[in-house]
Amino acid sequence: MSINKCRICLNENSNSHFLAFEKMFGTNQSFDYFICSECGCLQITEEIKDMRPHYPDDYYSFEENKSLRKRLKEKVKRLYFKFASTNHLRIESQGLGAFDLNSDTKILDIGCGRGNFIKFLKSKGLRNVSGVDPFVEKDIHLDGEVLVRKQHIEDIDEKFDIVMLHHSFEHIFEQVSTMESLRNLLKENGTLMIRIPLLGHAFDKYKENWVSLDAPRHFFLHTEKSMKELAFRTGFNVQNVVYDSTDFQFWGSEQYINGIPLFSDKSYAKNDSVIEPEKIREYQRLAKELNESARGDQACFYLTKS
């Protein structure tokens, strides 16, 4: 396959080069990407075989820091509280309706880090929940059971009612074969939830300074069109798309314009005082408007087998 042939829709005509830079930790190392002229997907030009240098020891450190976790992860949990709130046995999501559950509903969280959200779900009465993440140092246990396995998707040999990937799918290079593997993990009436960053207003405005570009850790930055194309290719129906972007797309990107890495002591992620509360409220209002017009910079896709 040509390095400029889209791996999602297979288009190879008029795709445009894009130069991205590592900004989360401030190394400013450059990486070649290209944008598909047909489906709009932004993707890294060549696979990086060894990603370990780009996931330093403190990559997951914000999970142990309440201030960082509140700003960088609460955007996911906002949906989660609806997701597991009704008598601990019913998952609700914006615009989708609800899944009826019981305490034994089998749920897998892929790319779950240290498993904080799995612990949350277990605390809500959903006991048959587990996670996998190839980047954790080793298996993580809770109360004598394996909470998170250091494992790749292809090595999982079970079926699940719900499989979730929250901001992990964009870190996976083999998008098509991974979707096929995810399909095999689902029971016949199962649901796949994929939450990812999306190209939208924030990318148009900030380009290489868009905070969720996150080169080189994000191999693929989808559009809604490219994600639907990928789902169709791999045997899925898209049941719904829920935009849930936050103020992070603005304050994170504005910091990058000013040369402030996400994990810097000068970052709002660590220091409340660097941005006025009125400005954050403005960013929150803008994010809400963008979500309502399907132009936010992240969304959750709800997929079922076709």
Image (tube, rainbow, N blue to C red):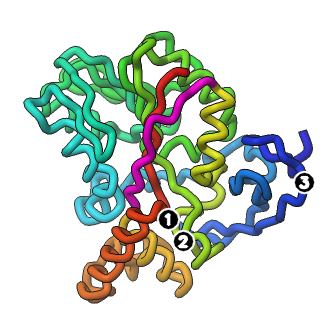
Tell me, yes or no, if residue 137 can be seen here: no
Residue at the left extreme, as displayed:
87
Q: Amino acid at mark 3?
A: Asn
Disc 2: which residue: 201
Disc with the residue nearer the chain's start (2 vs 1):
2
Q: Amino acid at mark 1?
A: Arg
Instruction: Give the position of the C terminus as an image quadrant.
Output: top right
Residue 122 occupies which quadrant of the picture?
top left
Q: Is 247 rendered above or below residue 188?
A: below
Disc 1: which residue: 295
Q: Nearer the viewer, residue 253 or 137?
A: 253
User: SS for tag 2?
Assistant: helix
Tell me, yes or no, if residue 126 can be seen here: yes
In this image, 46 relative to 214: left or right?
right
Q: Position of residue 267 (x, y in %)?
A: 39, 78
Residue located 33% across and 51% down the image: 76
Disc with the residue nearer the chain's start (1 vs 3):
3
| Residue 236 among those drawn in magenta | yes
Instruction: Give the position of the N terminus as an image quadrant.
Output: top right
Q: Is 60 rendered above or below residue 111?
A: below
How packed is label 3: few (under 14 Cα within 10 Å), some, or many (20 or more)? few
Residue located 22% across and 14% down the image: 104
Q: Position of residue 84 (x, y in %)?
A: 19, 36
Q: Main secondary structure of the magenta part?
A: strand
Residue located 76% across and 59% down the image: 35
Q: Is 199 rendered above or below residue 239?
A: below
CA gap between label 1 and label 3 equals 26 Å
Disc 3: which residue: 13
